[in-house]
Image: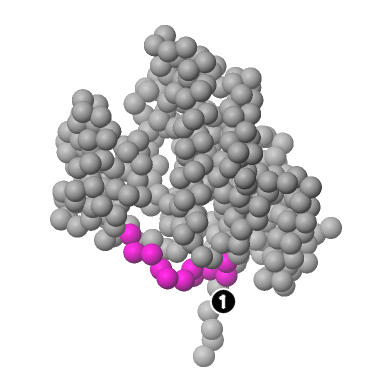
């Protein structure tokens, strides 16, 4: 009997601004890797600064996947990501390279590492429009409260501002009578030969980094990027335009709030997002955590991670 050889996979997760990009580039270069973006916003073309995409120089260092693949007008689902990432992992392994999924969108990443099974229930545009009007007139909290009544597990997982997924969860319940949480069956063990690396950081230090990153985004032209998207006809209601850094600047560009308030809103919501990211990943026992608070400890952390990869895959890093 021949045992099936599991495909290799490295996952690097952590909150925004913790340093995932730099680490992933260093590791992928040394271990002949290819990087799959695990970020739900970096799939969109024309949205570079606010999504914190790697620079052209960084993208050229190692092959990258699932970046700049769709228009801001298009929707992108976790099921689409799961299908694409799963296929890429196989292809990268077949090339003899090591796939790295890097990002902070917990549901996206875990859908691949533990093969979530998603509902194939039909879509009902009229029902969706009705729920969107409810969110617009009564607020996102009212919509989220409705979900909490029928599917408290999914409601606990989804933030009220994640209107798209709250509506989808209600749509699944309406069309099938089942909860979204019933459909998202999680494999107990990953099907991959997996190394799961988590980066964390002292909260105050992380929040300072987030605030500084937002300031750098503004200096780099984030306001002009959002203005350009609106000028090209991308409506503020699009899913892509609900992303952090985009949604907050639209009221400023419409003359409804000051730039100072918009920037402060981005910082605050990004800090809250980082907190939710950590909460999602903390419940996963497979993750090996590394505290990146002290810059002087980074070389030791990186060396330990390299030793883990070399030992797991019996592969020496490229020097």
* Circle 1 residue: 5
Instruction: Estimate how packed mark 1 is, as few (under 14), some (14 to 19) or many (20 or more) residues with alpha carbons within 10 Å.
Output: few
Looking at the rendered structure, the number of numbered marks drawn on it comes to: 1
The answer to whether residue 182 shows anywhere in this view is yes
| Residue 274 in the image: above or below residue 5 | above
Q: Residue furthest top?
A: 255
Q: Position of residue 235 (x, y in %)?
A: 37, 22
Q: Residue furthest right?
A: 319
Q: Position of residue 313 (x, y in %)?
A: 68, 70
Residue at horizontal 45 percent and vertical 64 percent from the top: 114
* Main secondary structure type of the part rendered in magenta: loop
Residue at horizontal 15 percent and vertical 55 percent from the top: 177
246 left or right of 310?
A: left
In the rendered image, which quarter is residue 287 located in? bottom right
Q: Residue furthest bottom?
A: 1
1 left or right of 173?
A: right
Residue nearest the observer in this picture, 173 or 62:
173
Q: How is the image coloured?
A: one colour
Quadrant housing the C terminus: bottom right
Q: Position of residue 265 (x, y in %)?
A: 47, 25
Residue at horizontal 71 percent and vertical 71 percent from the top: 311
The answer to whether residue 254 shows anywhere in this view is no
Residue at horizontal 74 percent and vertical 55 percent from the top: 302
- Dot 1 falls on a residue whose secondary structure is loop
Whether 255 is among the magenta residues is no
Whether 187 is among the magenta residues is yes
Residue nearest the observer in this picture, 16 or 57:
16
In the rendered image, which quarter is residue 290 located in? bottom right
Q: Position of residue 14 (x, y in %)?
A: 57, 49
51 left or right of 153?
A: right
Task: Write the start and end of the magenta stretch as one range.
Answer: 184-194
């Amino acid at each position: 009997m021949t045992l099936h050889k599991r495909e290799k996979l490295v996952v690097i997760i952590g909150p925004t601004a913790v340093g995932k990009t730099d680490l992933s580039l260093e590791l992928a270069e040394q271990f002949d890797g290819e990087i799959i973006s695990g970020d739900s916003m970096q799939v969109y073309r024309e949205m570079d600064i606010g999504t914190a995409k790697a620079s052209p120089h960084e993208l050229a260092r190692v092959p990258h996947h699932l970046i700049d693949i769709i228009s801001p007008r298009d929707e992108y689902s976790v099921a689409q990501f799961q299908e694409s990432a799963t296929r890429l992992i196989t292809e990268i392994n077949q090339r003899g390279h090591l796939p790295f999924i890097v990002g902070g969108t917990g549901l996206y990443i875990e859908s691949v590492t533990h093969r979530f099974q998603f509902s194939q229930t039909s879509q009902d545009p009229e029902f969706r429009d009705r729920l969107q009007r409810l969110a617009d007139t009564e607020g996102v909290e009212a919509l989220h409260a409705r979900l909490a009544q029928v599917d408290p597990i999914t409601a606990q997982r989804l933030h009220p501002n994640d209107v798209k997924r709250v509506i989808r969860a209600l749509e699944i319940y309406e069309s099938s009578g089942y909860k979204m949480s019933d459909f998202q069956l999680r494999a107990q063990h990953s099907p991959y030969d997996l190394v799961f690396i988590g980066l964390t950081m002292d909260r105050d230090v992380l929040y300072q980094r987030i605030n500084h990153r937002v300031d750098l985004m503004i200096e780099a032209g984030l306001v002009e990027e959002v203005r350009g998207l609106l000028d090209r006809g991308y409506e503020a209601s699009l899913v892509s335009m609900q992303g952090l850094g985009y949604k907050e600047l639209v009221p400023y560009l419409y003359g409804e709030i000051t730039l100072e308030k918009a920037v402060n809103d981005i910082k605050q919501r990004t800090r809250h997002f980082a907190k939710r990211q950590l909460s999602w990943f903390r419940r996963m026992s497979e993750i090996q955590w590394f505290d990146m608070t002290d810059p002087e400890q980074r070389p030791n952390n990186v060396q330990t991670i390299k030793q883990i990869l070399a030992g797991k895959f019996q592969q020496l890093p490229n020097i």
